[in-house]
Image (tube, rainbow, N blue to C red):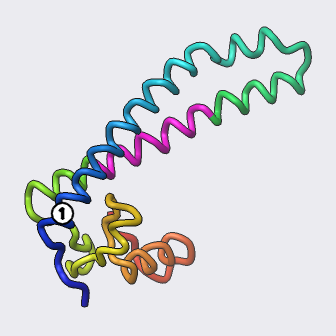
């Protein structure tokens, strides 16, 4: 069993979460501005044939996928920051055990311990464990 976080570890992880949140928000703002400038219509107008139009479509899809990935990470960070406030930060959402400090240092927004995350991923992929939302 992992030990709960020390106050110093909690402060450091909170600082990292806040820094990551700010950086991701800035990145999403920048990506949205770039996406406005590189819309499909603009890219498609610049391309002479169907193959080039496919590439333009792919580029727009990649921009949207990157923004979506960042927004989901922002949501995970917001959830972790709420948990810091309510005192449940650092505990697995599935089993309730403390998440190892090493795991949190790698990704401060992680919601599950290693064992439960593995089970969750196996359930998502192979159906061996029902996923929890």
Q: Quadrant of the C terminus?
A: bottom left
Q: Residue at x 63, y 17 (%)?
A: 39
**In this orientation, which residue lies closer to the viewer: 61 or 85?**
85
Of all residues shown, which one is farthest toward the left?
86
| Residue 34 percent location from the top left of the image | 57, 20
What residue range appears in magenta? 63-77
Judged by its main secondary structure, the magenta piece is helix
Query: How many residues crowd around disc 1 within 10 Å: few (fewer than 14), some, or many (20 or more)?
Result: some
Q: Residue furthest bottom?
A: 1
Q: How many marks are shown on the rendered structure?
A: 1
**Regarding mark 1 in the picture, which secondary structure is present there?**
helix
Q: Residue at x 35, y 66 (%)?
A: 105
Q: Residue at x 57, y 39 (%)?
A: 65
Q: Residue furthest front?
A: 8
Task: Give the vertical position of 81 relative to 28 (above or below).
Answer: below
Give left or right: position of 38 versus 93. Answer: right
Quarter of the figure with residue 45: top right
Judge whether residue 64 is colored magenta. yes
Q: Nearer the viewer, residue 2 or 63?
A: 2
User: Can you say whether 24 is above or below 107 in the image?
Assistant: above
Residue under label 1, please give it: 10
In x, y percent, where is residue 5? 18, 73
Q: Which quadrant: the N terminus?
A: bottom left
Where in the figure is residue 114, as x and y percent of width and height?
39, 79
The image position of residue 25, as x and y in percent, is 37, 33
In magenta segment, residue 40: no
Which image quadrant for residue 74? top left
Q: Residue at 16% x, 52% y: name it.
A: 82
In the image, taking residue 57 as reference, residue 53 lies left or right, namely right
Query: Relative to the observer, which residue lies in front, 117 or 11?
Result: 11
């Amino acid at each position: 069993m992992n030990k709960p976080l020390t106050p110093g570890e909690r402060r450091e992880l909170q600082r990292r979460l806040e820094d990551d949140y700010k950086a991701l928000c800035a990145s999403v703002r920048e990506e949205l501005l770039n996406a406005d400038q590189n819309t499909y219509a603009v890219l498609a107008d610049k391309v002479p044939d169907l193959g080039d139009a496919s590439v333009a479509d792919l580029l727009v899809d990649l921009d949207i996928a990157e923004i979506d990935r960042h927004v989901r990470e922002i949501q995970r960070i917001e959830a972790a920051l709420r948990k810091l406030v309510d005192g449940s930060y650092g505990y697995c959402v599935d089993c309730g055990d403390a998440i190892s400090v090493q795991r949190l240092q790698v990704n401060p927004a992680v919601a599950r311990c290693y064992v439960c995350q593995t089970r969750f991923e196996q359930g998502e992929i192979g159906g061996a464990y029902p996923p929890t939302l």
